[in-house]
Amino acid sequence: MSSDPWGRVDETGTVYVRTADGEQVVGSWQAGTPEEALAYFERKYEGLVVEIDLLERRVKTTDLSAKDAQTAIDHLRQQVDEHHAVGDLATLGKRLDALVAVVDSRREERRAAKARQTDEARQSKEKLVTEAEELAASEQWRVAGERLRALVDTWKGLPRLDRKTDDELWHRFSHARSAFSKRRKAHFASLDAQREDSRKAKEKLVAEAESLSGSTDWGATAARYRELMQDWKAAGRAQREHEDDLWNRFRGAQDVFFQARGEVFAERDAEQRENLTRKEELAAEAEKLLPVTELKAARAAFRGINERWEAIGHVPRDARPKIEGRMHAVERAIQDAEEAEWRRTNPEARARAAGLTGQLQDAVDKLQKQIDQARAAGNTAKADKLGRELEGRKALLDQALKGLEEFGG
């Protein structure tokens, strides 16, 4: 019989291993010596140690799943429990128990992590749904559409939840997207209809603009073009493929008209500037008649100047008040001279002026005499009163004398 600290072989070749519960049969050995038998089963023990060492490292250093780890543990425990090796099987059992605890802890950690991940995924999907439902009412069609597409990509990257929850959230999310798409489609359909109406309206404006391009009724046509431009702005935009072409035709028709008007106006402006130069020369000639010394000659000369003035024609609008004002000033000076001459040579007026002067002179002489009598009588108050009246009559007499002088004495 052969033995060592953990096992022995009896005379029949039966191999035993020592455990806390006593000796347990490992197997039977008939092929060699008892020492060889023990060595064989000791090597099996060492093999179990190696496998357990390897499993411990895998559990600690890799992402070995709890299920696979537990399967490996169960396989090794079966070999330990069935005493298929000679060695410290109790220690191996404790190591396997410790591994089970580690795997169970890892399983709980992963279960908790998965629960957290699921809860985070649920919250993330709920936020996506909420945002999608808010975007469903947006009219920022491009921005909201791009954001909804980004939300779909985000959704695809999130873990699936339980079927019921996932389906409910996806239904709300999908419904929000559909509602937005439906509203956007209706909006652009309405916009297309509006743009078609705008196209038709602008085609009419273009047709009228082109029909007016050859008009020479400058004022009325220019006013009508301004109205057409206001109508164009009010008509809104047509489809992109029509808008630029319509605008080019509309603007081109106006350019034809305004270019023609500009050429006519440029010619007219040149003529009016020339007229202004000629009228300035006549105004300077008329101003040389002042001051009026020979009324008859001045009147005849001004009449001739004015006839030439009237024959010249229009001058630029902004220069008109100044140049006409110069001629009017000369005309007024001649008229003033004519009035003065008429007053001087009018017999009736002269007679009235002379009569008024004589009456005022008589009144002054009479008042002076009354004043002298009052002072002689010592009536100073009456003399002062009559003196004040005398001063007023003298002032009137001075004015009458000046008027009489205008008639030549």
Image (tube, rainbow, N blue to C red):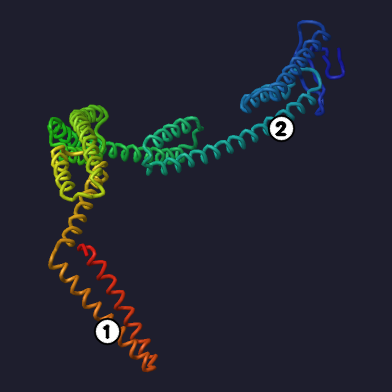
* Nearer to the camera, 7 or 267: 267
Q: State the SS at label 1.
A: helix
At label 1, counting other C-alpha atoms closer than 10 Å, the crowd grade (few under 14, some 14-19, many 20 or more) is: few
User: Residue flagged by tag 1: what amino acid is it?
Assistant: Lys
Quadrant location, the N terminus: top right
Residue 183 image position (x, y, % from top left): 31, 40
Above/below status of 133 relative to 50 = below
Secondary structure state at the residue bearing disc 2: helix
373 above or below 108?
below
Which quadrant would the C terminus be assigned to in this image? Answer: bottom left
Residue 24, image quadrant:
top right
Question: Residue 238: percent from the left, percent from the top?
Answer: 24, 33
To which residue does mark 1 refer?
A: 366
Percent from the top left, x then y, of residue 407?
20, 63
x, y percentage for residue 163?
45, 37
72, above or below 44, in the image: below
Crowding near the residue tagged with mark 2, few <14, some 14–19, many ≥20 C-alpha atoms within 10 Å: few
Residue at (75, 20) in percent of width and height: 53
Residue farthest to the top, as pictured = 32
- Nearest the viewer among 368 and 116 is 368
Closer to the N terminus: mark 2 or mark 1?
2
Say whether residue 214 is visible. Answer: yes
Residue 101, numbered label = 2
